[in-house]
Amino acid sequence: MAELLTPHGVALATRGLDLAGVFAAALQGGAIARTERLDLFGFVAVGVVSGLGGGLIRDTLLQHGTPVALTDVFYLPTALAGALIAFVIHIGQDAWDRLFTALDAAVIGFWAVAGAQKTLAAGLGWLPALLLGTITAVGGGALRDMMLRRVPAVLGGNALYASVAVVAAAITVVCSYAEQPTLGIVLGVVVALALRLTAYKRGWGLPSGLDWQPRSRFAGALRRRRRGEPVVERAGRATGRSEGAARRLRLRGARAAPGTRRRKPSE
């Protein structure tokens, strides 16, 4: 534990989490490729994009040399291994669904922590660490979904996703500023796993849109116009008020307003 507290130990732990995220994301991409009935090349392409996409985006934005996925000899083989395992092993649909959920939670935790830690190690502040930790966690999945012409999971429609990455990255940042980086790594991963799995099981999610609507007459007229409904309600009320006013004027013996038809007493 004492060695993990050193900068070298934290760097090793970050690299281990990064590789674990690559493998889990590539396996997850392979599982999706199986549901799409892709061939071997499709498994490899989807697995590599899913496994390396988030890290490539992060390292490109950091601009600290060539992305680590292209310089470290373990990254690409790790992604290929995850995709090929998903290609070779056939598991039932229910088992794949459970495995997919667990891998999804693991990827978010591993990469959010690794991305935030790498950003802090590069000398940037807490806000870039939150941003790049989140991008690292969701970037590969977003590229994978766009490749398969699916709505990216980060855009919603499921349980908590990007918000879990933000929480994990925030825990890492706070612990790093408190000079407890090892605690931040462990706690960030554990919280991300627990929060993501609980949100999936209980159906937690962010609101997709507010139902509040302006109550003014102008807003109501706009809504009716958009629906193609005739805007006659206000005119009808105004006509009713004018007829009532004319009737009261006649009862008082006053002259009716111009354009108002007089009614005979026998009517």
Image (cartoon, rainbow, N blue to C red):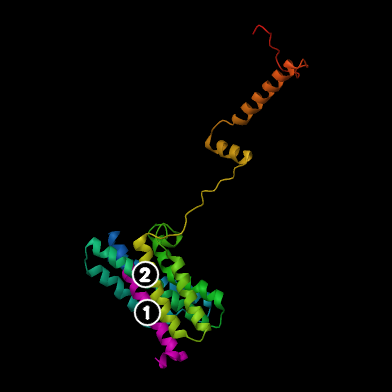
Residue 235, horizontal then vertical, whole percent: 63, 28
User: At label 1, which amino acid type do we have?
Assistant: Leu
Image: magenta residue range = 1-28
Residue 166 image point, x, y percent: 48, 70
Magenta stretch: includes residue 50? no
Inspect this view and state whether residue 48 appears.
no
Q: Secondary structure at mark 2?
A: helix
Q: Is residue 176 above or below residue 259?
A: below
Q: Pointer 2: what residue? A: 105
Is any part of residue 54 visible from this angle?
Answer: yes
Q: Quadrant of residue 215?
A: top right
Q: Position of residue 264 (x, y in %)?
A: 69, 8
Q: Residue furthest front?
A: 252
The C terminus: image quadrant: top right
In front of the other: 244 or 82: 244
Residue density around tag 1, few if under 14, some if 14–19, many if 20 or more, within 10 Å: many
Residue drawn at the location 26% of the way across and 72% of the way down: 85
Mark 1 secondary-structure assignment = helix
Which circle marks residue 19 in the picture?
Answer: 1
Q: Residue furthest top?
A: 266
Can you tell which mark lies on residue 154? none
